[in-house]
Amino acid sequence: MSRDLSTPRPYRGLGGAAVRLLLPAPLLAATPDPPDSTVYTAPPVVVTAVREAAPLDRLPLAVSAVGRERFAPGEKSLSLAEALRQVPGLHVAERNNPSQGPRLMARGLGARAAFGVRGVKVLLDGVPLTTPDGQTQLGNIDLAAAGRVEVLRGPNSSLYGNAGGGVVAVHTRSPETAGVRVKPRLVAGSDGLWLRRLALAGGGRHSFHLSVRQLDLDGYRDHSEARVRGLNAVVRSRLRPAWELVWVLNLYDAPYLLNPSSLIRGDARDRPRFARGFIVRQGASKQTRQSQGGITLRHTGGNGRTELTLYGVDRGLLNPIPGAVIDLERRAGGLRAVHGRTLRLGNLPGSWKAGLDLEVQRDDRREHGNEGLADPDTEPARVPESVALGALLQDQEESVSSAGAFAALALHPRPGWTLSLGGRLDRYGFEVSDRLLDDGDDSGTRSLSRLSPSAGLGWQVTPRNLLYASYGTAFQTPTTVELGNRPDGGGGFNPDLGPESVASFEVGLRGRDPSGRLTWDAAVYRLAVDGMLIPFQVDDPASEAVYYRNAGRTSSRGLEAALAAHRGSWRAELSYTYMDFLFDDYVIRSGEEPVQLSGNRVPGLPPRRLLLDLAADLPFGLRAEGETEWVAGYYANDHNGPPPGSAAAPTDFRNDTYVVTGLRLTAPLTLGFGGVRLFTGIDNLFDAAYNGSITPNAFGARFFEPASGRTWYAGLEADLGPP
């Protein structure tokens, strides 16, 4: 016997009769059952992040699909971290710094990001949020509108090019019924949190989802106020039974995002809300806007699938940081095409796919000296534009062009077996035109190309369990920002900075028990990186610019495991990540002497992380959920302690282990014209003092970014429209 897990059932028996007498009918519609012996049959899960529609239980890859029911109830819907916290192998470091945003790391790749996301390809409804040079800003994502998030863990350059850590694909949920529905949402909470959102959704042959939102935040730390506005729109048109057209538009506007920067260990411990006076006087902040649109034409039928996507991005950034003010205008766009179909190779059934990606990016970059704020008490909304500009330090045009062609073949040599082979050839061209010629002409070009092969073998040990082994490679270029930030202060691109090359082998098991109540996902892997990009700061108290260098060789051994169980009205999920990421060969200069750091751990990466999530449907339609996260301590610099010649304490260079617990409660109400969900939550229930993130290799041992203490929030979300 099977049933849809989303369909509520009334109480049965004598207790159920009493409840029916005491509760009004609208509330009974949301009242759950006590545990019973029903066998749940989960529908097959299909993912598209592999650039085709493929069943999850046949893919010989580390892949996860997170449904809306696992991240939406009772959440603030502010950060992608809310949807990814249960995925093993991923870690989202919340920086409590709206100017920099959360740092997303997949199998340790992405820790180098000074802001935004590096090393992970992010897509929203099939349109890349990641620009051609590998940078990603997550502000365009409206998590409250998301219906599903798919995650590929590990190197995936054979499919996506600049994606060494993995791929995150976010899909907006489609309207479930015809007619127009109105969905307002309000959230208020600690530290001046105030989120207003209004969404319209309509189903039918031409379905749409439109949302507008505004977030205001005072921030946990001093000098961390923020305002964000956004619009997200997705329109799906079924032209014919086999043809679909999808339009995507995302607008993002952040008039001010103040930056409290990082702290030394003593300040982070004793006054975590503190922001240094120098940071405030320099007006450290960000003002940014971004418009992104795309159109996808999709054909499915005749044993094949074809998809063509055209997209463009326009971004503006004003970014005062200590020592400089960066003024950047960016335009980027691309064309993505893929075609796949089934085949028979001799007596072997299978499928193939092939595609082409073409992308361009052009940045107009100016950098002035930072003369600071005339009035340190300038109101937050005026800070970015009130910073006085000094001398012009850089004036250059940077461009990136990339072309990537890929092909993949999947064969089924025996029933239950899948053999996959793939490869991609990428070529990236970087060009800089120096317009500030007083100190010489630093114009130049860089060309980077690589072939990225992949292979996988999967065996369905049982119809519900897949054992697989896979080999993947990746090629990651430095971004234009990483190339343009030169420690010597010159213009143009850093000639000493090269790309990362990633190779990984893994073995995994993914499946569920016959009842469908228990699911598991586990993988062990070995990953090697040549030329890993490592961030650092120079010995200059008046600057917080982040520069980059290549480590010779690094490697990691890892284990990822997730276990989920549900029975009746209860659900439990356990996720564990182990990662031993070491420098194998890395020589840097400390003073005049070279120092070999072989055997040290890569900074900024927690070696172990454990998450336990429990949820229960309670009487009267209530739903309670709580999670506890344990993150092991990790080092903050390449030396894994004081550098040679320093008398500082070793603890000043290490982020401590921390444990945080959160609770959430929702109460849905059914009305004649729709429903309302009331929700509330407490984050960091036990008021743990900890640092949610660090700035690797920061100057002056200012590594630590304190996390919020105990905070609360409450809100309501309505879904109004015809029944």
Image (spheres, rainbow, N blue to C red):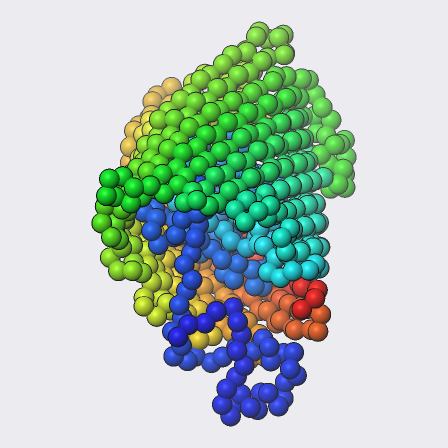
Residue 511: name its quadrant.
Answer: bottom left
Query: Considering depth in this image, is 706 or 115 the residue closer to the camera?
Result: 115
Which residue occupies 46% across, 49% down? Answer: 150
Which residue occupies 39% across, 52% down? Answer: 55
Which residue occupies 46% across, 22% down? Answer: 428
Residue 612: name its quadrant.
Answer: bottom left
Residue 330 shows in this picture: yes
Tell me residue 196's x, y (percent): 71, 55
696 is higher (above) or lower (below) than 496: below
Q: How many marks?
A: 0
Task: Please give left or right for residue 278 compared with residue 355 in the image.
Answer: right
Task: Please give left or right for residue 257 compared with residue 626 in the image.
Answer: right
Quarter occupied by the C terminus:
bottom right
Query: Considering depth in this image, is 259 or 503 the residue closer to the camera?
Result: 503
Tell me residue 142's x, y (percent): 61, 49
323 is higher (above) or lower (below) than 505: above
Residue 192 shows in this picture: no
Quarter occupied by the N terminus:
bottom left
Tell me residue 510's x, y (percent): 32, 55
Which residue occupies 57% across, 47% down? Answer: 240
Tell me residue 37's x, y (percent): 38, 79
Query: Considering depth in this image, is 445 or 369 the residue closer to the camera?
Result: 445
